[in-house]
Amino acid sequence: MNRRMIEEILFKCMMLVSLLIVLGSLGLIFLTVFTNGLPALNLAMLTQTPKGGYYLGKEGGILNAIVGSLCLAGGATLIAFLVGFPIAIYLHFYAKRKRIAEIVRLVMDVLWGIPSIVYGAFAFILMLWLGVRASLLGGILALAFLELPILTRGIDEAFTMVPTALTEASYGLGATKIETAVKVVIRQTAPVILTAILLAFGRGIGDAASVLFTAGFTDRLPDSLFRPAASLPLAVFFQLATPFPAVQQRAYASALVLTGLILFISILSRALANKMKKHIIR
């Protein structure tokens, strides 16, 4: 065998090993959560809020954490999208050759890499300055800061995938930049935009550090933006911190619910993305 064939075989082996490591790690996580959490998972746990003594092993469920996580991540994703989407449009259509576009993209990349605990600390200081206590609103704002760079850069990269000839044809027909963005580019990149939204939502619903001091925790269902709200990651943390084996097993059940929720959203988004692909010009 010559050198090129040896290099190709070597790189194929490296790629195969990397694939097996990733799949093995994912399978091990699923197996651990499934085997430890399934025995404790029941209908009452999904449909009830914690009762008195729940963290001592008595009756109740995690409905408050499920609803709270959906409210926190959903509200944060909506805010991040409403702010990030116009930024992405500006970067791609109005400032793509200006220095400001490079600066904004660099800032977003830096913000993407900042640990979530820093966002939580920043939002907590902001809440103290505004006189806002730990609440659903505080958690939403903290997660919105966390998700903003993910959404903005994801949508910005999606816009770069659109063929230049397509946008130039739109301009040639007399369309403005904003008309081209809304009627042409968004239709072309809808599946990728949906993926970016999912990525941001998944980051928000699975994060604990940024909502620990901003959203707080409560056994009640969220009924106001100005009251504390529970979340599944914190429910897992608090249940694992107890010395009672039964409650610790419920923590794995909560983790199983969170994993299943993210898996369901991923499958749903993939189905919607495949449906949207029929509008794409190839």
Image (spheres, grey):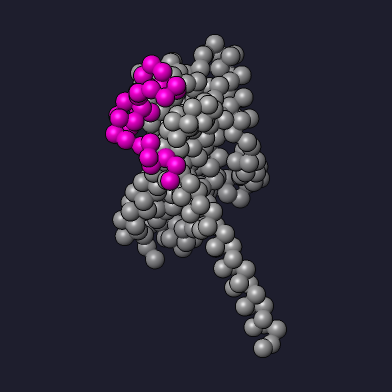
Q: Which of 25 and 36 is in front in this view?
A: 36
- Locate residue 7, reporting x and y percent: 67, 78
Specify start and end residues of the magenta stretch as a single range.
35-63
- Locate residue 258, reporting x and y percent: 42, 39
Q: Nearer the viewer, residue 197 or 263?
A: 263
> Residue placed at 43% from the left, 15% from the top?
227
Q: Which residue lies furthest to the top in this view?
A: 131
**Res 79 seen here:** no
Horizontal side of 41 relative to 135 (left or right) equals left
> Residue placed at 54% from the left, 46% from the top?
153
Residue 60 drawn in magenta:
yes
**Res 111 seen here:** yes
Instruction: State which quadrant residue 145 falls in.
Output: top right
> Residue placed at 64% from the left, 83% from the top?
5
Image vertical order of residue 55 relative to residue 196, above or below? above
- Locate residue 52, reporting x and y percent: 38, 16
Instruction: State which quadrant residue 91 falls in.
Output: top right
